[in-house]
Amino acid sequence: MVTTESAAQDLLRESAKLKEESGKRATELARSLIEEGRRALDPLLEQVKDEKRDNPPKNAFQLPVDAFEMALDLDESECGDDARDALNEIMECFEEEEEERPPPNHDHTYDVVVVGAGASGVGMGLMLTRIFNLDPDRVLLVERSDKVGESFRRWPKEMRFISPSFNSQGWTASFDQNSVAFGTSPAYTLQTEHPTGEQYANYLHLLAEQAELKIRFKTEVTAISPIRKGGFKVDVAPSSHANGANGTEAETLRSRYVVWAAGEFQYPLGESETFPGSALCRHNSTIRSWSDLPGDDFVVIGGYESGMDALYNLSMCGKRCTVVSSTAFWHVATDDPSTELAPYTMERVRQAFKIAKPKPKLLAPLRIESVEKVSSGKGFVLKGKWAAPVEYEGGENRVPIDGDESIEETGEEGAEVELRTPQAPLLCTGFAGSVKMGVAKDLFAWGGKSSGCMAGAPLLTDEDESTKTPGLFLVGPQVRHEDHVLCFVYKYRQRFGVVADVIARGLDFETEQHIEQLRELDMFLDDFSCCKGACGETC
């Protein structure tokens, strides 16, 4: 009995200590936020006081407002007075100058329905309401899960962002590559350079909560129908993808515009028969943790980012790993970060080959043509065929993966290969995307097989509007323009302002001032040519 009481007392003391340490950390963060907020606010206040200069736009104050409000949330008792005083200073600047919104020019309940509350959905919601001043009550985000950024929460726990987060806003006009809105930084919020999916989802949740975005969770979009006089009917129903009962009934929403921002992760390539027996494989998006994956000998199909991520994590867990790829991406060197392996990825691959036992193995260019179960039912047989070897230009100064040539294998063109593995082969073949697999598919036209980068991609206007359905826009990693792939956050976020501008002007908002601000922040990419088309060449 004495032992039990003593243990309980120890636990109580330890809990009190942890709570105290957590409180100190919260206070430190709150004070840092106030410092950052003041650093951003003071030049704006000076501009307001200077009668020779125009006042800064209201949305220029959003960063300090967010910083002070977050400081209040973290530690109101220690830092509340300073944060409230600063917020009052901001309020005084706009007591007589409140930007008016034009009255609705349509009869629909919503100005915009955004499908999805992930990175592109939250980023677009912030752009519409915080920058272009649309009424937050008339911009609705529809999310089929029960949380913001749910797709990121389903990443394997070892998976990381390959683009680095770095909080540089205090020094340059640039900002965190993984941020969806200026004035925010995953690096600052999360204090990590390569966030996990869970961490990034928490960052998005914080943004949505602070901005008070209107989000309807546990709601599935079942149909989108254009209205002849303009606008859309958006049919919604309780989602089967969310945890717990929803409590809402099927209904039809009416909106002037619809923005499709439903992402890619939930629609993996390979679930259908991409080659005979592909349904026997397991897609990497179904893995919750590589360390918990049963088995110790795996064949990975696909050698791009997700395939190399699988190679690294399997190898570092002491599992045998063979990567089969139709292209030796580890040798590809291009000037577009969307079409070659990221430096972060290659750094980890080199680490795996340096220290992992057994070493992984690379086979390319080898295309898998079929997967079968062995007759005994224990294990799988992969049948493939070697393609012609390829010499890749560029990258002469890059560090080789490993000095051991046995890690990489290339065969004679046309020769057949048979691989055996005790576990289901792992498909690291990417994602079909929600546009192609979702209810909006027939509302877009699609690029043909001979369309280069646009092959199999939704066709869009210069403002990312469907060429087939006016008023329907696409944002996120599935946006393509000619030979430009906008798959990273720092790429596709530059199109948020382009879409928001078209929508806002369609609702009779004045947008010139907002566009000028976005151009200064490099957040309004509306021309892909190196000199605005004057030379006829593209960047």
Image (cartoon, rainbow, N blue to C red):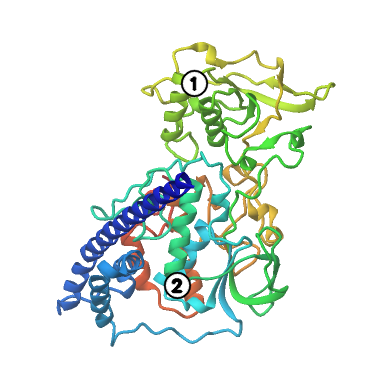
* Front-lying residue, 322 or 507: 322
Q: CA distance from mark 1 to mark 2?
A: 49 Å
Q: Name the residue tied to disc 1.
A: 356
How many labels were placed on the picture? 2
Q: Which residue of the protein is positioned furthest toward the front in this rendering?
A: 1
Q: In the rendered image, is residue 488 in sight?
A: no
Image coordinates for residue 472, horizontal then vertical, percent: 60, 66
**Where is mark 2, residue-wise?**
129
Label 2 amino acid?
Thr
Q: Residue at x 51, y 18 (%)?
A: 357
**Crowd rating for badge 2 (residues with CA inside 10 Å; few <14, some 14–19, many 20+):** many
Query: Element at badge 2?
Result: helix
- Would you call the spot at circle 1 few (<14 residues within 10 Å), some (14-19), or many (20 or more)? some
Kindly state the secondary structure of the residue where label 1 is placed: loop
Examine the rendered structure and indicate whether residue 324 appears above or below residue 520: above
Q: Position of residue 380 (x, y in %)?
A: 75, 24
Identified at 53% across, 31% down, the residue is: 313
Q: Position of residue 405 (x, y in %)?
A: 50, 12
Q: Nearer the viewer, residue 67 or 262?
A: 67
User: In the displayed structure, does residue 366 sit left or right of residue 491?
Assistant: right
Residue 294 visible? The answer is yes
Location of residue 521 by image quarter: bottom left
Amino acid at circle 1: Ala
Residue that appears at 23% across and 68% down? 41
Q: Quadrant of the C terminus?
A: top left
